[in-house]
Image: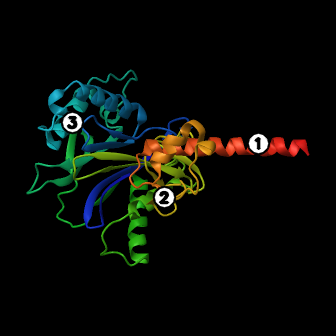
């Protein structure tokens, strides 16, 4: 069971393609840490699914493994359409190999247990490229996976929800339309509204099958993609990435969304240090000094790895100061 969304975000005079999904896997049990959003080895496209995990995972794993071995599909010369057609052909080949071991079971129902959203930046489409999204699904008539493009509807604003069960997809669309009406933003560019709908449903106990932290990815016009973490279930929650919970020390070095407003969390490092001395920072003195300007202000554009290292250094200093204070109190 799943609810996922794909839409073209229009903000800051540019566009980017956003994919997102919940993290819940069900089927006789419930697990809120399943990966449901994938970057295929070609970095300008994303894939997510709604439906049976038992049907989706073998298909996706075969896809990732196969493209790793296909030099053309990984090359800049291959197009998004090339990947799409390969994906459809591979899924069809795999799905027709399924053998039912239950008498009189409908083989077509067995094969059609999952649907996919696939999309990315198509540099060869139009004058200067365009974002494109397709829905892939099994066709009984064709006996294979076919695809329908969703971004060729001629509208200036594009979004789509894909859900299992199908009713949740309709619920999400109605909630989205109501949000646009209530906030009087029907004609405004799409920003983070679809993510807010996905968040609200994931946090609503009435929808048992839609749960867990959101998984969010973006495709940019630079022909690259980026995965994001999110604090969950609120800004005061734990950092999560691809459905898994982390803590501040071991979280992946990615950018994190605040689920309360879907803004990126700014750096939690001090903007200015009054003293940067070897006495305070010991063996880490030179590293800390290199991360801050001579004025004591944090340098702009620090890599995430450097920021992470600074956090560890500051935590270590705070702990040593705590131990020192404890020892002083014991002497009184």
Point 24% across, 44% down: residue: 44
Please indicate whether residue 228 sits to the left or right of residue 82 in the image.
right
Q: Is residue 202 above or below residue 45?
A: below
Please indicate whether residue 64 sits to the left or right of residue 230 in the image.
left
Between 42 and 284, the one nearer to me in the picture: 284
Of labels 1 and 3, earlier in sequence is 3
Q: Is residue 283 above or below residue 169?
A: above
Give the farthest residue toward the left.
127
Q: Which residue is mark 3?
A: 88
Point 36% across, 34% down: residue: 56
Badge number at residue 324: 1
Badge number at residue 154: none
The alpha-carbon separation of the residues under discs 1 and 2 comes to 28 Å
In this rendering, which labeled residue sits more in front, label 1 or label 3? Answer: 1
In this rendering, which labeled residue sits more in front, label 3 or label 2? Answer: 2
Q: Secondary structure at mark 2?
A: loop
Of labels 3 and 2, earlier in sequence is 3
Residue 216 is situated, as x and y percent measured from the top left of the image, at 40, 49
Please indicate whether residue 265 sits to the left or right of residue 153 in the image.
right
The alpha-carbon separation of the residues under discs 3 and 2 comes to 52 Å
Of labels 1 and 2, earlier in sequence is 2
Q: Which residue is mark 2?
A: 297
Between 270 and 295, the one nearer to me in the picture: 295
Point 21% across, 54% down: residue: 131
Q: Residues within 10 Å of mark 1 (few under 14, many from 20)?
A: few
């Amino acid at each position: 069971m799943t609810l996922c969304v794909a839409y073209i975000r229009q903000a800051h005079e540019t566009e980017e393609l956003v994919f997102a999904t919940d993290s819940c896997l069900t089927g006789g049990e419930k697990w809120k840490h399943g990966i449901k959003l994938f970057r295929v080895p070609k970095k300008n496209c994303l894939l997510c699914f709604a439906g049976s995990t038992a049907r989706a995972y073998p298909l996706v794993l075969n896809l990732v493994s196969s493209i790793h071995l296909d030099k053309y599909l990984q090359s800049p010369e291959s197009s998004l359409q090339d990947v799409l057609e390969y994906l459809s052909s591979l899924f069809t080949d795999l799905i027709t190999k399924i053998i039912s071991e239950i008498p009189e079971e409908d083989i077509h129902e067995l094969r059609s247990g999952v649907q996919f959203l696939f999309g990315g930046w198509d540099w060869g489409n139009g004058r200067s490229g365009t974002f494109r999204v397709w829905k892939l699904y099994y066709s009984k008539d064709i006996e294979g996976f076919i695809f329908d493009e969703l971004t060729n509807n001629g509208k200036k604003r594009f979004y789509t929800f894909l859900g299992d069960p199908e009713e949740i997809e309709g619920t999400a669309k109605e909630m989205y339309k109501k949000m646009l009406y209530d906030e009087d933003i029907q004609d405004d560019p799409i920003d983070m509204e679809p993510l807010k709908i996905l968040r609200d449903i994931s946090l609503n106990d009435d929808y048992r099958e839609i749960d867990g932290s959101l998984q969010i990815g973006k495709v940019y016009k630079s022909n690259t993609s980026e995965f994001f973490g999110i604090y969950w279930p609120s800004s005061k929650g734990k950092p999560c990435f691809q459905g898994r919970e982390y803590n501040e020390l071991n979280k992946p070095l990615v950018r994190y969304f605040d689920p309360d407003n879907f803004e990126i969390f700014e750096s939690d490092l001090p903007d200015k240090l009054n003293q940067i001395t070897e006495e305070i920072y010991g063996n880490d003195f030179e590293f800390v000094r290199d991360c801050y300007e001579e004025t004591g202000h944090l340098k702009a554009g620090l890599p995430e790895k450097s920021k992470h290292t600074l956090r560890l250094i500051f935590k270590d200093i705070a702990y040593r100061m705590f131990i020192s204070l404890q020892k002083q109190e014991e002497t009184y």
